[in-house]
């Protein structure tokens, strides 16, 4: 252990409620590094703004023997660090390769580490979800032309979404079991395999006789649909296992945005490739989606189950076994309320994206117009989701944000419904932006809250149940939308139905008021040193100490 001398008046680095602060130590005191979090309001009140003051050199023996009572939690945290009066001797020998170096396991504190490999795993999950969403939304923006190519009705093309969703409901529990029991890597590999094989079959339909093209499309779509539960269920688990608590929601959001980004990508490339004058261009579209799926499967080959050292306290806690966890969450009233809200939100969103062309084509809008609606929705939503993720990771105001966004998405769909008349394309674009701004961020937020209110149940269990119920309800919403379509093709009644459905989560989420269990756990009174933050702080303190000693 390298010892660094301390000097009077050296700037102090103190962690109060998770934030590093820099303060001057009085002349009769020595620098202290305290990594500290409060477990209850009594302790927080006792320490006011959450900063532990520096103190004269303690006697190590009495400090170590101090009982960790509520009144003395911060003292206990300091004692566990074992700080001496003349050095930073109690700190571990931090290494600059904090994202991949070895631990210095000293008694008295726990070292949690974040590895650079977490970004590779995040990228693998993101790209696989992008590819899967592209396969599910390939024909959304070009439904009329695709129907001509496959010699069938537009409803048959739209029903591909039902196939995608139906197989999801069937395979969600095997996917959840695999994720919770075998880990991320095998789950991602199964999902990648399904993407590649399903898209390959769709591209292979080019060589199939006319009568076999549609069945081949459905088989390929079904295989790609089977891979979806192995991919959609992964982000919450990945965020919990690989990322620190202040990064979790952001990471979860980015990975879940893979689905939204895939829908937007399909909405852009499909109208460019497929033209009304040449229905056979659908073959080219199928080939492009196959190449895309194969390329985006590559990062999954390098993904690992988990890092050698946990990135956070909650990641170090053993999860409840799958079947026991399923029983626990289904008895949790807050989880049920959240799941019902999530199901209505995402079910409406799925119905909206499925019928994106059909909603506005009867009013004289083109396939490109409907594709642009989806692109605007996703682009605005992606930016908003990233901003919300970063802000909420720091403020922890998850519940408030969720309640506000639920109101916003309902208002956006009402705005879109009213605007769906001829010659109002700018209003449709504006309504799509509102729906995206509120609708895209709330989806990963609901999944994250599902994990929070059921911890320590495994992340895959809670999110898997939420996804399974949601996808089942999506089928119902799609079928109802089709049933409400007029013979002329007008879907105004179906759009009004979506407005009514979105009133359900808007009201229910206002009553959601349960404590975030993981966040509470990580705000406990254990002394925790995070390597990648502490190394910068210690180095900075050492430099300033050297300057002060020369002066």
Image (cartoon, rainbow, N blue to C red):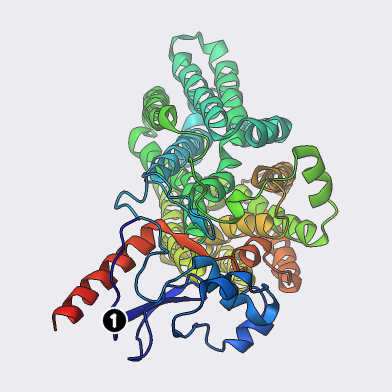
Q: Which quadrant, please, contains the N terminus?
A: bottom left
**Residue 34: x and y, percent?**
46, 73
Residue drawn at x 78%, y 45% as measured from the top left: 325
Q: Is residue 301 left or right of residue 175?
A: left
Compared to 495, does 300 lie above or below? above
Q: Is residue 229 above or below residue 437?
A: above
Residue 183 point in image, percent of width and height: 59, 34
Q: Nearer the viewer, residue 193 or 36?
A: 36
Q: Which residue is mark 1?
A: 10
Q: Residue at x 45, y 35 (%)?
A: 131
* Horizontal relation, residue 55 to residue 65: left or right: left
Residue 331 appears in the figure: yes
Q: Nearer the viewer, residue 307 or 77?
A: 77
Q: Residue at x 67, y 32 (%)?
A: 181
Quadrant of residue 502 within the rendered picture: bottom right
Where 382 sits versus 22, above or below? above
- 448 or 208, which is in the foreground? 448
Locate the C terminus and report the quarter of the image it occupies. bottom left
């Amino acid at each position: 252990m390298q010892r660094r001398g301390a000097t009077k008046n050296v700037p102090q680095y103190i962690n109060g409620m998770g934030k590093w602060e820099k303060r001057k130590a009085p002349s009769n005191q020595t620098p202290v590094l305290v990594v500290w979090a409060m477990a209850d309001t009594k302790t927080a009140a006792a320490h006011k703004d959450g900063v532990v003051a520096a103190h004269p050199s303690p006697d190590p023996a009495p400090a170590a023997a101090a009982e960790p009572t509520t009144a003395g939690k911060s003292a206990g945290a300091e004692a566990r660090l074992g700080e001496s009066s003349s050095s930073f001797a109690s700190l571990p020998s931090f290494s600059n390769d904090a994202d991949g170096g070895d631990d210095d396991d000293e008694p008295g504190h726990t070292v949690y580490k974040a590895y650079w490999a977490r970004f590779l795993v995040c990228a693998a999950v993101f790209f696989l979800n992008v590819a899967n969403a592209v396969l599910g939304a390939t024909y959304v923006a070009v439904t009329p032309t695709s129907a001509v190519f496959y010699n069938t009705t537009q409803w048959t093309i739209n029903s591909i979404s039902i196939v995608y969703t139906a197989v999801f409901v069937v395979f969600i529990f095997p996917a959840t079991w695999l994720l919770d029991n075998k880990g991320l890597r095998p789950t991602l590999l199964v999902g990648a395999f399904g993407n590649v094989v399903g898209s390959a079959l769709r591209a292979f339909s080019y060589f199939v006789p006319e009568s076999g093209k549609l069945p081949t499309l459905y088989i390929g779509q079904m295989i790609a649909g089977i891979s979806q539960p192995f991919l959609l269920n992964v982000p919450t688990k990945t965020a919990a296992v690989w990322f620190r608590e202040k990064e979790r929601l952001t990471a979860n959001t980015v990975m879940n945005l893979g689905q939204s980004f895939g829908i937007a990508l399909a909405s852009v490339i499909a109208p460019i490739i497929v033209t009304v004058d040449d229905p056979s261009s659908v073959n080219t579209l199928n080939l492009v989606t196959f190449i895309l799926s194969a390329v985006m499967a590559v990062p999954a080959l390098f993904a690992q189950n988990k890092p050698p050292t946990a990135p956070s306290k909650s990641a170090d806690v053993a999860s409840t076994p799958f079947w026991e966890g399923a029983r626990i969450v289904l008895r949790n009233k807050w989880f049920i309320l959240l799941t019902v809200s999530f199901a209505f939100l995402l079910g409406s969103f799925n119905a909206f994206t499925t019928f994106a062309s059909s909603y506005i084509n009867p009013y004289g809008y083109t396939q490109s117009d409907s594709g642009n609606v989806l692109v605007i929705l996703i682009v605005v939503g992606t930016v908003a989701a990233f901003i919300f993720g970063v802000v909420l990771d720091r403020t922890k105001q998850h519940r408030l944000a969720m309640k506000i966004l639920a109101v916003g998405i309902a208002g956006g769909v009402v705005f879109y419904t009213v605007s769906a008349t001829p010659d109002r394309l700018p209003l449709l674009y504006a309504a799509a932006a509102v729906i995206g701004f509120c609708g895209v961020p709330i989806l990963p937020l609901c999944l994250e809250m599902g994990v929070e209110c059921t911890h320590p149940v495994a992340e895959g269990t809670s999110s898997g149940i939420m996804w399974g119920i949601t996808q089942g309800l999506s089928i119902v919403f799609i079928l109802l939308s089709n049933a409400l379509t007029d013979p002329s093709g007008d879907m105004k009644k179906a759009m009004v139905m979506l407005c009514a459905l979105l009133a359900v989560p808007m009201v229910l989420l206002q009553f959601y008021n349960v404590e975030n269990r993981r966040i509470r756990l990580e705000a406990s009174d254990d002394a925790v040193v995070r390597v990648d933050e502490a190394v910068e702080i210690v180095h900075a303190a050492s430099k300033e100490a050297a300057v002060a000693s020369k002066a």
